[in-house]
Amino acid sequence: MDIKRNAANIVSVSRIFVAFIAIGVFFIDSQCSYIWALALTIIAFAMDGVDGYIARKFNQSSDWGAVLDILGDRIVEASYWVVFAVMGWISIIFPLICIARAFTTDGIRSVALSQGMTPFGEKSMQSTKWGKFICASKFMRVSYAVAKVAAFVLLIFAYIPGLSYDIASCTERVAIILAWFAISFCVIRAIPVVAESGKLFK
């Protein structure tokens, strides 16, 4: 494999493993391990922007790259929601919504891909202006990403062993509010995919 020509795809896949390492570190109950988990989580989500930048900068955009990017997003996001719920930090409703939404949208998008359409870009399956805005606009994508990353980072921070109760409690409340914003964006961004899916089955 030509590493240089596939740099964006390599970053997309690599961030899954970075996230898994971060998640594994959660189960080591020490202040140092949680700080490492926090740093690796930030790196994992920063890599989501890096792969897109590399793809655009070096003209490595492709349908396969778009699929890998979404695949990475789903695995990383769902893994964090599930582990947070397992650890009792959030309600089980968060990973259930995330996973149900992922199966729904990605199932529809797989049909669209078989018909030559992509989730984003010039061949996007979204044909309406409101659909393109909700699914693909920079504002919606950045808003969703910021809410999600902030919620995840603050949740980890709130449970660092040795953190004072007042700081931990305040941070946790803010993180839960942001988590609700993130999961709401998750659902809202799925609406156009479902609403415009009828054309795929005619």
Image (spheres, rainbow, N blue to C red):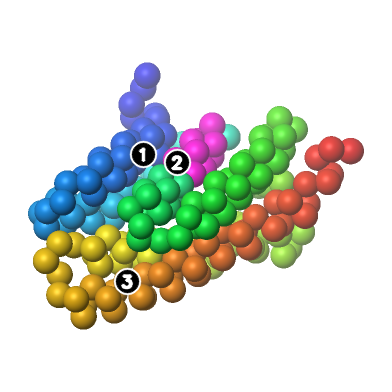
- Pointer 2: what residue? 75
Mark number, residue 172: 3
Mark 1 to mark 2 CA distance (whole Å)? 7 Å
Residue at the location (45% across, 41% down)? 75
Q: Is residue 11 visible?
A: no
Mark 3 to mark 2 CA distance (whole Å)? 24 Å
Horizontal and vertical percent position of residue 129? 73, 63
Horizontal and vertical percent position of residue 150? 36, 66
Give the number of the mark in front: 1 or 3. Answer: 3
Q: Residue furthest right?
A: 202
- Which of 142/18 is in front? 18
55 over 153 or under it: above or below: above
Instruction: Say whether disc 3 or disc 2 marks the residue closer to the N-terminus.
Output: 2
The range drawn in magenta is 64-75
Instruction: Give the SS element for disc 2.
Output: helix
The reply to whether the C-beta atoms of the residues labelled 1 and 3 are less than 8 Å apart is no
Mark number, residue 16: 1
Quadrant (top left/top right/bottom left/bottom right) for the C terminus: top right
The three-letter code of the residue at mark 2 reads Ile
Residue count near mark 1 (Cα–Cα under 10 Å), binned few <14, some 14–19, many ≥20: many
Side of 26 relative to 142 (left or right): left
The three-letter code of the residue at mark 1 reads Ile
Horizontal and vertical percent position of residue 46? 33, 53
Residue count near mark 3 (Cα–Cα under 10 Å), binned few <14, some 14–19, many ≥20: many
